[in-house]
Amino acid sequence: MTRFSERALQCLKEKGRENTRRHLEQIGKIWTDEEVTFLQEVYPSTDYSFNEIIQSLPKRTDNAVRFKARRLGLRRPIPTKESHGCCSHCGQTSKEATS
């Protein structure tokens, strides 16, 4: 459940906008519990690429995912030579990396 302060909820009710939270969740402005839990489970994992994570969260842009992860204190693992598959990290040329 997304956390609103009691004061914010009271203000919404006073203005007759008690459905505002649900509306914001539906249009993707507020992260749902399921999205946050998913992000906490897969973002720090090496089992999922960043593109796979973004594809699993269709309402979210890549920047939204990065920003939310940062706010949650999550970090992606640093690629190693064995896992990155890209020569830009280890200094090999493209031909060396593919052979």
Image: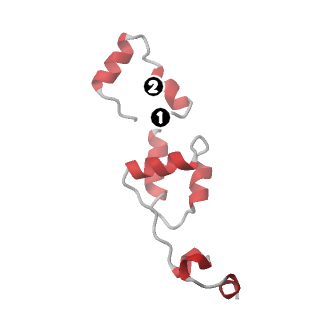
* Type of amino acid under label 1: Ile
Residue highlighted by disc 2? 21
Q: Position of residue 69 (x, y in %)?
A: 44, 51
Query: Does the image show residue 37?
Result: no
Q: Could you tell me which quadrant the C terminus lies in? A: bottom right
Helix, strand or loop at label 2? It is helix
Vertical arrangement, residue 16 with respect to residue 7, above or below? above
Q: Is residue 71 left or right of residue 25?
A: left
Judge whether residue 56 can be spotted in this image.
Answer: yes
Quadrant in the picture for residue 11? top left
Mark 2 burial class by Cα count in 10 Å: few <14, some 14-19, many 20+: some
Mark before the other along the chain sequence, 1 or 2: 2
Residue 65 percent location from the top left of the image: 51, 49
The correct choice, above or below, for 49 with respect to 10 in the image is: below
* SS class, disc 1: loop
Residue at 47% of width from left, 21% of height from top? 20
Q: Are marks 1 and 2 in contact (CB under 8 Å)?
A: yes
User: 2 or 72: which is nearer to us?
Assistant: 72
20 lies above or below 27: above
**Residue shown at 47%/19% (left/top)?**
19
How packed mark 1 is, by other alpha carbons closer than 10 Å (few <14, some 14-19, many 20 or more), is some
Is residue 40 positioned above or below 94 on the image?
above
The answer for how far apart the CA atoms under marks 1 and 2 are is: 8 Å
Label 1, on which residue?
Answer: 30
Numbered label tally = 2
Colour style of the rendered protein structure: secondary structure
Query: For the residue marked with disc 2, what is the amino acid?
Result: Arg
- Who's the residue at 46% across and 48% down the image? 67
Q: In which quadrant will I find the N terminus?
A: top left
Residue 58, horizontal then vertical, whole percent: 61, 44
User: Residue sitting at 37 percent across and 14 percent down?
Assistant: 13
Residue 59 in picture, x, y percent from top left:
59, 40
